[in-house]
Image (tube, helix red, strand yellow):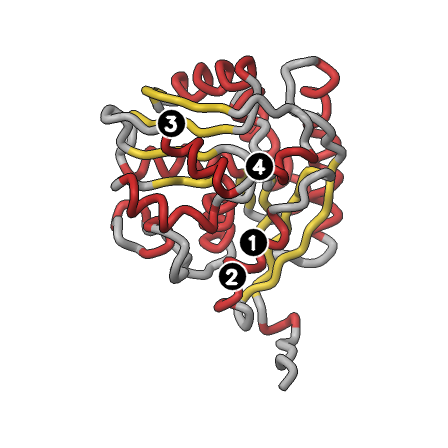
């Protein structure tokens, strides 16, 4: 029996700005909300992203003009929320994401957020000030992230990285490698683990690894979905995707 189509007017719509070379977040996001298919639909547009380094030409990939143009295209679809499903502010600075959200609000009137803002919001609301950091990036980018998160009140007590810079290659990081990254990033001082990169498939491993390591894990694809659902007026409760979606931490229940 074929699935029954739910008319667009009956669903809340979430617009995602995505890196052009990302092949992970769209299928993973859709999979995560499969049980909410009658309530929400996802709509994606892309900006050019080729590599993650601190070189000016790669920082320029995330200029606000390109992001705003993408957001305006999404607003044509009358979406209920717009999110930047990328983590660039983790190494360019949070002001870039805050500026982007202000511009989106001004030009489209649609509520917005980003993966990095959502991740830091979760840490703040949950009272997590010490974390273990797992990333696929180079040592240079990792060091910048540690500095920026520290300025935002999240002290990285331990970390692990894979040394990848090409954005297409992020999708090739295996599940086994992601699990090992999380184990290597863990430490007794870390209250939670943060997995940064929407190009690495890690959200599907969170519940299993939380049970193994005994602490919350906040993955980039997962946190932006958590925030997007809340912005769209849908309670972010999903089975099998870890403590963030289980509602097991009252402080993390977003106001709808």
* Number of the label disc, if any, that sits on residue 173: 4
Name the residue rendered at 49%, 33% in the picture.
196
Q: Neighbour class for label 1 at 10 Å: few (<14), some, many (≥20)?
A: some
Residue 192, position as x, y percentages in the image: 31, 34
Check disc 2 and report the residue beneath it.
Answer: 33
Q: Mark 1–mark 2 contact, CB under 8 Å?
A: yes
Q: Considering the numbered disc 3 on the image, is that residue within a helix, a strand or a loop?
A: helix
Query: Which is more toward the observer, 117 or 216?
Result: 216
Disc 2 to disc 3, C-alpha distance = 28 Å
Kindly state the secondary structure of the residue where label 4 is placed.
Answer: loop
Residue at (49% x, 20% y) in the render: 145
Q: Is 156 displayed left or right of 11 in the figure?
A: left
Closer mark to the observer between disc 2 and disc 3: 3
Q: Are marks 3 and 4 in contact (CB under 8 Å)?
A: no
Residue bearing the label numbered 3: 185
* 84 displayed left or right of 231: right
Report the mark closest to the observer, 4 or 2: 4
Report the side of 44 relative to 32 (left or right). right
């Amino acid at each position: 029996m074929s699935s029954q189509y739910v008319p667009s007017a009956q669903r809340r719509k979430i617009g995602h700005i995505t890196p052009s070379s990302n092949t992970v977040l769209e299928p993973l996001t859709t999979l995560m909300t499969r049980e909410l298919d009658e309530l929400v639909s996802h709509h994606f547009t892309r900006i050019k992203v080729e590599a993650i380094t601190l070189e000016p030409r790669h920082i320029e990939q995330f200029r606000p003009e390109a992001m705003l143009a993408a957001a305006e295209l999404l607003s044509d679809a009358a979406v209920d929320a717009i999110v930047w499903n990328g983590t660039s502010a983790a190494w360019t600075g949070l002001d870039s994401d805050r500026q982007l959200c202000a511009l989106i609000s001004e030009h489209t009137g649609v509520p917005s957020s980003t993966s990095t803002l959502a991740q830091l919001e979760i840490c703040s609301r949950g009272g997590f000030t010490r974390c273990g950091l797992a990333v696929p990036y180079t040592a240079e980018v990792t060091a910048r992230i540690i500095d920026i998160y520290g300025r935002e009140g999240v002290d990285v007590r331990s970390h692990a990285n894979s040394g990848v810079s090409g954005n297409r290659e992020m999708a090739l990081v295996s599940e086994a490698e992601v699990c090992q990254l999380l184990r290597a990033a863990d430490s007794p001082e870390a209250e939670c683990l943060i997995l940064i990169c929407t190009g690495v498939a890690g959200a599907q491993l969170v519940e299993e690894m939380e049970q193994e390591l005994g602490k919350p894990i906040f993955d980039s694809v997962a946190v932006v979905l958590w925030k997007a659902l809340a912005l769209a007026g849908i309670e972010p409760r999903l089975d099998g995707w870890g403590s963030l979606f289980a509602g097991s931490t009252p402080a993390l229940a977003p106001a709808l």
